Amino acid sequence: MDWHLAFQLQQASSSSASTIGNNTPLNSSTFTTLQLPPAQENFECGVCAEVHNVNVRISLADCGHMFCKECLTTYTRTKIGDGRYPIFCPECVVERPRAIKSQLAENEIQQLDIPAESLTRLQELQLVLHCITLQCPRCKEVMNVDRVQFTEQSVLVCPLPRCGHKWCKSCLKTLASSQHQHKCKNSNIDRLMKRKGWKYCPGCRTPVQKETGCNHMTVSFFSLPDIYSHFCYKCGVLMVDTTFGGDVGTAVTEHYMECQLFEKRWRCSIQ
């Protein structure tokens, strides 16, 4: 009798499990698929270390470091205001050696909220990187010439149509318009510079005389007075041709690990 009752209960349980509500059989159409909202993608800014939504993320292509738009905009505007170009990745400046730091590309800078005056300043910094700023001895106009062409040529010509002045890059002597070659190895300026120990600026070839101080020489440009060329007065090597931010100090330190920063003119007499 107990066995028969248990069998009936088992049949009732199995039949009730196959129906729901008003004895409706279960099938695949009975269930409704729930649509979950998409997960929000976030990232951590490399400057402020806060978590932001990917909508404000700017990733640098060269190194892959990610920053929020506000932080990278502030950083870039500060570097432009300080006359620093190229603009290096904030994280690479701390993490990597100077030779392999990635730079902000043009399309990455365009994504930032940079005002028009800062963009104009940036173009000037880019121009200085690839050009030499000269002043014509005759018309006194300031001009930018290609750095590579300036290095290869020994005779310079003012590009202004109303001037066209031609002069020697080394001795600054005025040349005739038909004169394309000039030798000034034995010129008075060369003999004077050799006798006095003066040096030519390796960037613009302007004669430079050191009056006092160390051998680290700084030359400013005509049109950009806060942009400098750094060279060694001892050996004449150009260390940095523009203000690369912290790289100025790094380049000077690396150079004078092998060269002489101060002249050894005195000897200690204390025994």
Image: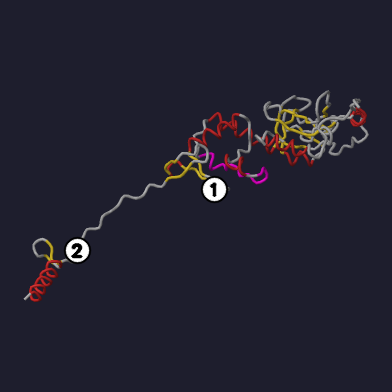
Quadrant location of the C terminus? top right
Relative height, residue 39 to residue 21 (above, below): above
Total numbered circles: 2
| Image quarter of residue 256 | top right
Which residue is nearer to you in this view: 164 or 71? Answer: 71
Q: Is 74 placed left or right of 32 in the picture?
A: right
| Image quarter of residue 214 | top right
Which residue is nearer to you in this view: 22 or 132? Answer: 22
Q: Is 36 placed left or right of 119 in the picture?
A: left
Which residue is nearer to you in this view: 139 or 53? Answer: 53
Q: Any magenta on residue 266?
A: no
Relative height, residue 212 to residue 113 (above, below): above
Relative height, residue 25 to residue 41 (above, below): below
Q: Mark 2 and mark 1: span between their CA atoms?
A: 47 Å
Residue 245, image x and y in percent?
A: 65, 34
Q: Residues within 10 Å of mark 2 (few under 14, many from 20)?
A: few
Report the amino acid beneath label 1.
Gly
**Mark 2 touching mark 1, by CB under 8 A?**
no
Secondary structure state at the residue bearing disc 1:
loop
The colour mode here is secondary structure
Q: Residues within 10 Å of mark 1 (few under 14, many from 20)?
A: few
What residue sits right under mark 1 in the picture?
Answer: 64
Residue 251, image x and y in percent?
A: 72, 38
Quadrant location of the N terminus? bottom left
Report the amino acid beneath label 2.
Ser
Secondary structure state at the residue bearing disc 2:
helix
Magenta highlight range: 97-110
Q: Is 208 placed left or right of 159 in the picture?
A: right
What residue sits right under mark 2 in the picture?
Answer: 29
Residue 53, image x and y in percent?
A: 42, 42
Q: Residue furthest front?
A: 2
